[in-house]
Image (tube, rainbow, N blue to C red):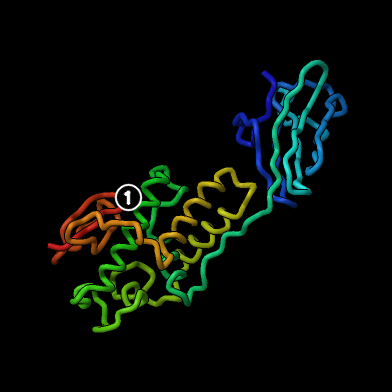
Amino acid sequence: MVNFVDTRGMSISAISIPKNGTKRIRTNGLTARVATDIKLENGRFITATLTNSPFNGPRGQWTIDIKGTTVGTTTLKATSGNKSAAIDIEVFDKKVIQLPQSSTDEGLLARLFLAESINPSSPRYKEDEAITSMLWMRQVVENRKADSKPSRFAITATSNVTYKDVVIARNQFHGFESYPSLIDSIKNNLLTLVNTANNYNHPEREKYATFVNAALAAAKSNALDSFTDPSQKGLYGWRTKDSSAPGGDFVKHADLAGQTFYTLK
């Protein structure tokens, strides 16, 4: 079989590249004595460059570097002798994902949800659960903000409670007590998540982009417009699954995406 593979050795039949971005792929099974024995053919929108030596000669793996030059679609074909492989390529305008300003409610909530959620780097990560979990987290924040007894959540404000009042409450959300200042581990984690979501050469970029966008969506003012609180008494807290229970008025509601969510008695 003659085809293309990515840098992990996974078979691919199509790829997407941002304009002015690059992508490295390899042939698989396309034997050739020297690079000049391989002919590359492509339409507009890209440039394709074959390296001079094979990545893995016995398996016919030759490295090709592709750059997207103009938005559009084309097909790259590599031929050696009577064997050939083809791959469809889309070149698109790159969209940069950014977190809202830290001074805004959306910026605060997005950072909280990203920091508190299991992300794609974990083997336990499940996309659909992560998206739902962030909405549950948003519901927790909303319920605390609207509660008639904010002091039971260590909120010092007694009226007109803000999102920031909820999040910076003492011993409630690790690393956020001095927000917008964050502890280094959280700052580094957020930076890695956003950078990976914007790195079009990263094999897991789409997973990270979906994850970050889920946090942005859960942080929007209308995030809960079509959402129903899953607990009859309301969600009021969460902790990492298998950590100690918060006690007091809290009772377990359910486990989701590596978190245990709590309602009230």
Q: Is residue 129 left or right of residue 67?
A: left
Compared with 48, 187 (above or below) is below
| Number of marks | 1
Q: Position of residue 113 (x, y in %)?
A: 40, 61
Q: Is residue 42 visible?
A: yes
Q: Vertically, is 95 above or below 122? A: below
Front in this rendered view, residue 142 or 125: 142
**Element type at marker 1?**
loop
Quadrant where the image shows the C terminus: bottom left
- Image point 34% across, 63% down: which residue? 138
Q: Position of residue 82 (x, y in %)?
A: 80, 15
Residue at the limit of the structure toward the right, as seen here: 36
Residue placed furthest toward the top = 82
Corner quadrant of residue 43: top right
Image-quadrant location for residue 37: top right
Q: Is residue 10 above or below residue 134?
A: above
In the rendered image, the residue lying farthest to the left is 265
* Residue nearer the viewer, 185 or 229: 229
Question: Is 136 left or right of 5, judged from the image as shown?
Answer: left
Residue under pointer 1: 258
- Residue 227 vs residue 259, the one in the foreground: 227
Tag 1: amino acid: Gly
Q: Quadrant of residue 108?
A: bottom left
Residue at 39% over, 50% down:
130
Coordinates of residue 158 in the picture (x, y in percent): 24, 84
> Residue at (68%, 45%) from the top-left corner?
17
Q: Which quadrant is the N terminus positioned in?
A: top right
Left or right of 145 on screen, residue 63: right
Name the side, left or right, on which 42 lies relative to 240.
right
